[in-house]
Amino acid sequence: MQFARARLPLATLFSALPLTLLTAGGAGCGSSTNAADKDAGAAVVDSGVLDTGALQDSAAEASQPEAAAPESGAPACPQPDGGLPAGYPAAHAPFPDVTYQGAGILAEPEVVTVTFQGDTLAPQLEQFDDDILQTCWWDDVRSSYCTGANGAPPCLARGKVPANAHVELAMAAAATYTDADVQTFVQQQVASGAFPAPDANTIYVVYFPETTTISDPGLGTSCQTFGGYHGSTQVTPSGGSATSVAYAVIPRCALPPYFNTALDQLTFDASHEITESATDPFASGQGAGFYLDFGNQANEAWNLTAGGEIGDLCVDLIGESQNTPHDQYTAVGANGSYVVQRMWSINAAAAGGDPCVPVGPSDAPYFNTAIAAGAGLQVLSVGGSVTFEADGFSTAPGTTWTLTGFDWTSYTTGTASSITVTPNVTSVENGTKVMVTLTLNSQPPQLAQGISGAVFLLLANSGTTFHSWSGIVIAN
């Protein structure tokens, strides 16, 4: 299942392109309200798309459980193993830039678990929320998220368990909610005192029962178009002042084949939303916390492919159809082990290998094919072609993969393909230089007002493992 994916509005996204590029492409950018913004309750929502599992992007082996957090009396968190073999990975263009954009983080996040009457999983969910921000998994995830210049403090710290961490409501959830309803619900529960008054680091994580559907024009429908989201809203505690607070919505969906239990699915879901709530809690059309940097035009396609937050960038893009998808990890806490998601690391991406952490001891070597710097955004007339370089890289010897070009826009929209993406070689290994020919065969779909284009992927495949690198073509 795919989870929450924040997306900037396309007109805003393309306004980041150099004026000369937009002029060359014949595209004009109109103003647009951020599609992720929800007006009611001054809230911001990060919504996602549920993957139908048509293809697979999972590693051959799931990660092994990490060492327990030091607080539990278990050994300290494992240390890096000393790096990668000489020459691995081969030189390649950098991964997308995730940067701090000034809208704040939750420096010491505090999760308040909210469940409804009759939820038999409430004790386990409460235990997970209490434990997860104290684990070695969280230490790996948070290690490169500092808001100071050049990675200086203040930095994202271990979370804290608030004094009133558990809310078990003596009420049934409604059958349906919009996001505006969710915001109102959170506001009412805070005002009544049912929810503890928030501080600057609070996240209300609301676990809805399987009998509830969240459906909203800006989001779609839970368990169909999204598997979870997070946002923020204004609340006023009794006797207090209005303040913004982060919240996460975790619906309960039919169990997909790649999770063993409903609890595994929920903790995986929640780990994504808790992480993004901490690193990008108050994103709006005016700014974000940690998000893809659109000062780098090469990042544009990645946002359209996966979304720009650090959980989005490590969700399997091509579908999850096995029991051990590449993005699962087992986090060990003081009171149990939990299935969670691996997350984007600024430091790991800069090192050039697998950008998603933690990397488990039995994870398969990472491999990919990187579009050369400056070639990830092309402007073509219909019928035109361009050829550019892409570079194969992996984290260990003996890794080979098959490379194909893939029209992502056609796949996700169900429209006819408008482009072909043809590498001159299809068998790739670390250090292979590939020449890729991109042809715009017909007018592509409209991406925003006055802008037509298509997102493409270089798709690297070995067995059941897929990795991809995103690019975009704009019609001239």
Image: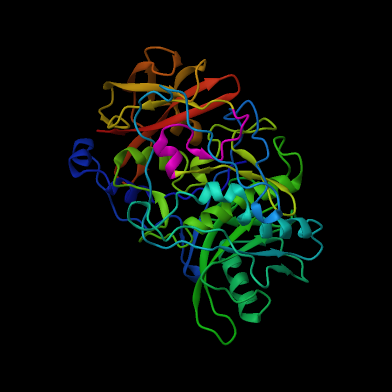
How many marks do you count on the picture? 0
Is 347 within the magenta? yes
Residue 93: image quadrant is top left
Give above or below for 121 relative to 201.
above
Residue 4 lies, in percent from the top left, at 54, 49
Instruction: Check if residue 262 falls in the magenta segment.
Output: no
Does the rendering let one see residue 4? no
Query: In which image quadrant can residue 102 be found?
Result: bottom left
In the rendered image, the quadrant that contains the C terminus is top left
Residue 100 in sight here:
yes
Residue at figure coordinates x 45%, y 19% from the top left? 404
- Above or below — where is 327 with respect to 467? below
* In the foreground, 114 or 75: 75
| The N terminus: image quadrant | top right
Q: Residue at x 32, y 47 (%)?
A: 294
Q: How is the image coloured?
A: rainbow
Residue furthest out toward the bottom:
239
Residue nearest the observer in this picture, 107 or 120: 107
Q: Position of residue 125 (x, y in %)?
A: 72, 57
Residue 30, percent across and down?
Answer: 28, 52
Q: Nearer the viewer, residue 128 or 475?
A: 128
Magenta residue span: 346-363
Image quarter for residue 55?
top right
Q: Is residue 330 left or right of residue 34?
A: right
Q: Residue at x 60, y 84 (%)?
A: 238
On the picture, is 15 further left or further right than 3? left
